Image (cartoon, rainbow, N blue to C red):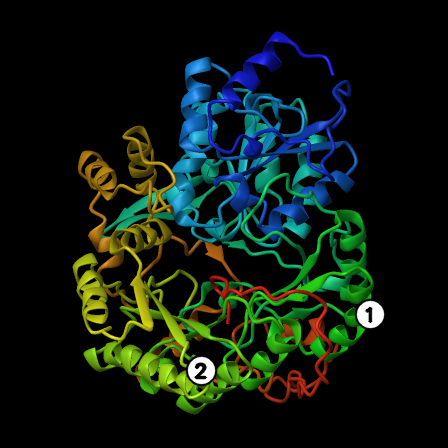
Amino acid sequence: MVFSEESDDLWRILARVRKPSRYTGGEWGARIPSETSEELLRLCLAFPDVYEVGMSYVGFQILYALAETLPGVGVERCYCPWTDMERELAASGRPLFSLEGRRPLKEFHVLGFTLQYELTYTNVLTMLHLGGIPLRSVERGEDDPLVVAGGPGALTPEPMSPFIDAFCVGDGEILLPEILECLRAVKGASREERLRQLAAVPGVYVPAFVTYTPGPSGFFVSGGSTPLPVERRFVPDLDKSFAPETMVVPSTEIVHDRAVVEVFRGCTRGCRFCQAGMVHRPLRERAPESVEHLVEKLLDASGCEEVGLMSLATCDYSHLSAVLDRLGPLLKGRHASLSLPSLRMDAFSVALADSLEPLRRGGLTFAPEAGTARLRAVINKGISEEDMENTVDETFRRGWERVKLYFMMGLPTETEEDLEGILSVSKRLLAIGRRHTKRAQMAVSVAGFVPKAHTPFQWDSQATMEELREKGRFLKSRTTDKRITLSYHEPEQTFLEGVLGRGDSRLGDVVERAWRLGARFDGWGESFDFGIWRRAFEETGVDPFPVVLRERGQNEPFPWDHIRSGVRREFLWKERERSREALFTPDCRGACTGCGFERHCLRARGIAGKSLDGDCVSRSSCDHPLPVSSGPAREIPQEKGGA
């Protein structure tokens, strides 16, 4: 290897930062695009969080592998540097660079961000600044990259609209090839022309070509020279869409270190608080033979010792029995284990986990979400007291000694009785566990509820920080049994998540001011400083409280009305009304609920022609004879947004 003065300087920098492996690249499966070809459209996929988090995000792996297959495209990656690396880069004058070719971000044609979580928004500005790219779209010149963004944040784009040139609304497997082909065709054209061509791609939103109208509650997109509304694009058939058969193998430990295959996309449960369950409709399942093929290819390409079957609720996968039959011999032959990233609270899930996790290290995680049957009906969480008791009884009977429960506080219509229900449920379930072992423990995590856009609760107000803090202290003070540990999320982070997820374009000024004041990694408790954000709101003159602390009228406009998820507004309002009567809406696998995806849903499942008010598809009986374990036990986490 030949070392230059520049590379020597980089190694000196890396010697002074924590976890230098975050920035070295060179992973198995990563390839450096051609340095000489001037024809390449250079794309850098940018994840606004640290390497360990970004490398665990399956969508990023899919986009990377897909971009590598596209003609005339060179793809590389970049993750947000931690604050120590940010300081070193700034002090040295070295721009932020890609992992593959160590190319400065400003030298790419396209910079593609994934907006997975609102509290990473300031990290986007960090990466732009360190990459030598002007923060705001209007400040960028002809030679600057086009900055595009996708992910959940694209469904509520306005708070980041001053900084993002184009938002990609929907599934990347469809949008990425069309966007890159569009930009290849106009490579060399003016910046405005490239953006106009992008705006003509269905599912792409370009803020530069819209007009804003001020209203009593904010600024709203009212028109412009681009087609509106922007409709979310979605893959109609997973088996016919791109799926990676290779992956980049991380060079250091990451959050979820395993090969992952998505078994289905969407959810039919209809939890009213869950944005992912609403916006990822319709349900699309991958065939068992496709899952087996992808698992085999990924294991052979990566050498991973664990495979995860991913979805919002993997135990709802109607082909789960067939897939487990197919994977048993395959995993055994490769000495690999299988994990499920989400479990439902039923005996089948526990029995399945037992078959996969015989050593019972750690524990199992479940999400009742609310402490009383009434409030679970409000949020459409179909779990009864009997379900919870039977599940926990089965868990401890099979040898686990620890269970973790996720709840929310501040839910619509919540009363003190509902809060006390969290405590009584936890105590009752612990008592069931102690029938089987004196070492039984219960970990309870309580998050503040955020009313998300494109859900039935988007009209609802959010609990104040003071209310959430009082609720958390109420729960904490009444948790006296040392075998129950209870924690609750910081109310300030919950508040900020609500503001950034529901605000209009004025929030861009706040995000930039907070960043300039030092806001970094706001989703990390160790670095979050709400005092910075309080000052940013004051200095920009933006009052955040009306954004989240008031209830909306049925026909009041939202700052995201120009973005359509595909679920009808009328359906969401009807579900909100049903919540107020604590009426449960059944799983739409049994009967169509008329959300707006009826035609697509039926076609995607291959049963077009059936009545929309008849059966959509029946859930499997889940009577699979549980397989012999294929590997060591690992705790199965309940991932955010899951069942």
Q: Which residue is nearer to you in this view: 231 or 629?
A: 629
**Residue 188 visible, this orientation:** yes
Question: Residue 456 in the image: x percent, y percent?
Answer: 39, 71
Horizontally, is 15 left or right of 536 in the view?
right
| Label 1 secondary element | helix
Report which residue position mark 1 lands on. 329
Q: CA distance from mark 2 to mark 1?
A: 34 Å
Quadrant containing the N terminus is top right
For label 1, count other residues whose C-alpha is less than 10 Å away and answer few (under 14), some (14-19) or many (20+): some
Q: Which mark is residue 125?
A: none
Number of marks in picture: 2
* Residue at the image position 60 percent from the left and 38 percent from the top: 198
Report which residue position mark 2 lands on. 437
* Residue at the image position 73 percent from the left and 78 percent from the top: 627
For label 2, count other residues whose C-alpha is less than 10 Å away and answer few (under 14), some (14-19) or many (20+): some
Horizontally, is 203 left or right of 48 in the view?
right
Q: Against 631, is 174 above or below?
A: above
| Label 2 secondary element | loop
